[in-house]
Image: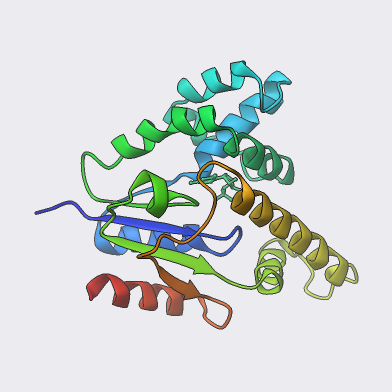
C-alpha cells in the first residue's frame, strides 16, 4: 500500500507534538518532531559558544545525527530562543531538508513543524495547521509545569510565557525562508475550545475523508 504522509504545522505551544504522536500511534506510522532538529542545532551552537550566523553552525546541522535530537536538554527557554534563530538561517534549513525527506522513504510518517506542508512535503496526503490563541496556549503550558495551581505568581508567569510564545510565532512567521504559514490546502484546526482527544477526533475525521 502507498505510504501516507501527514504534515502537521502550526503555532508554538499549540499541542502539535501531542497530536502528531497520537496520530502516528493510532495509524501505525512513524513520527518525527522536526522542531527537535532545530533545537539540537541550537543546543550545540550554545555549547560551542557560536552565533547563529556562523558557518560552523551550518556544519553542525550537516552532521546532525538522531542521537543529537534525542538529547533531553532541548526543551528549555534558552533553547527555544536559539532554535528560532538557527531556523531563520537558509543554509541551516537547507542542511536539514534532506534529512527530513529521507525520514519518509521507508514507511508512512506523521511529521510536525512549521514548514512541513509548505516546503518539506508540499505533496503530503493530509496537511493540518493547528492554531490557538496565545492566552490559551500560555495557560496550558503553565499548567504543564505548575506545582501549585494557586501560585501567587501565576498571572505574571502566564503573561511571561505568552510573551515568549508570541515572540517566537512572530519570528517564525516573518522570516524570509520557509515562514510559518498554512499551505493553501491545509485544514486549519483551532484548538481554543478543544481538549486533546477532541483535537485528535477532528484530525482523524479530516484524514478519513
Ligand atoms: O516545534 P518547536 O517549538 O520545538 O520548534 C522550535 C523552533 O524550531 C521553532 O520556533 C521554529 O523556529 C523552528 N522550526 C522550524 N521549522 C520546523 C520546526 C521547527 O523553523 N519545521
Q: Looking at the image, which residue sits at the far bottom?
A: 193
What percent of the width, then of the height, locates residue 24? Answer: 33, 58
Determine whether 85 is above or below 168 in the image: above
Q: Quadrant of the C terminus?
A: bottom left
Name the outermost residue toward the front.
176
Q: Answer with left or right where residue 122 lies relative to residue 112.
A: left
**Between residues 150 and 93, which one lies in front from this camera angle?**
93
Model colouring: rainbow
Please give the count of numbered marks on the rendered protein: 0
Q: Position of residue 151 (x, y in %)?
A: 85, 70
Percent position of residue 157, x then y: 83, 63
Q: Residue at x 57, y 30 (%)?
A: 41
Q: For residue 204, which quarter of the picture? A: bottom left
Judge left or right: residue 123 versus residue 34.
left
- Residue at 60% across / 38% down in the picture? 88
Please identify the quarter of the rendering in which residue 94 is found: top left
Q: Residue at x 60, y 17 (%)?
A: 55
Taking 163 as reference, is 107 left or right?
left
Tell me the quadrant of the picture where the N terminus can be found: bottom left
Q: Position of residue 45 (x, y in %)?
A: 65, 25
Residue at image point 84% right, 70% down:
154
Q: Residue furthest right?
A: 152
Q: Is residue 171 above or below residue 16?
A: above
Amino acid at each position: 500500500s502507498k505510504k501516507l504522509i501527514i504534515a502537521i504545522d502550526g503555532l508554538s505551544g499549540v499541542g502539535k507534538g501531542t497530536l502528531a504522536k497520537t496520530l502516528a500511534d493510532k495509524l501505525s506510522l512513524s513520527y518525527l518532531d522536526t522542531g527537535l532538529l532545530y533545537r539540537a542545532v541550537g543546543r550545540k551552537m550554545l555549547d560551542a559558544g557560536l552565533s547563529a550566523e556562523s558557518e560552523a553552525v551550518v556544519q553542525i546541522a550537516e552532521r546532525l545525527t538522531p542521537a543529537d535530537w534525542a538529547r533531553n536538554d532541548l526543551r528549555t527557554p534558552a533553547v527555544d530562543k536559539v532554535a528560532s534563530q538557527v531556523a531563520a538561517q537558509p543554509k541551516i534549513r537547507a542542511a536539514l531538508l534532506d534529512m527530513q525527506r529521507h525520514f519518509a522513504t521507508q514507511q508512512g510518517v506523521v511529521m510536525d513543524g512549521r514548514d512541513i506542508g509548505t516546503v518539506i512535503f508540499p505533496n503530503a496526503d493530509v496537511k493540518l495547521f493547528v492554531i490557538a490563541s496565545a492566552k490559551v496556549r500560555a495557560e496550558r503550558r503553565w499548567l504543564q509545569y505548575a506545582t501549585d495551581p494557586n501560585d501567587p505568581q501565576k498571572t505574571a508567569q502566564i503573561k511571561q510565557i505568552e510573551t515568549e510564545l508570541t515572540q517566537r510565532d512572530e519570528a517564525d512567521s516573518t522570516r524570509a525562508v520557509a515562514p510559518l504559514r498554512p499551505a493553501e490546502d491545509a485544514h486549519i484546526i483551532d484548538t481554543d475550545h478543544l481538549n486533546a482527544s477532541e483535537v485528535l477526533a477532528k484530525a482523524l475525521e479530516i484524514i478519513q475523508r
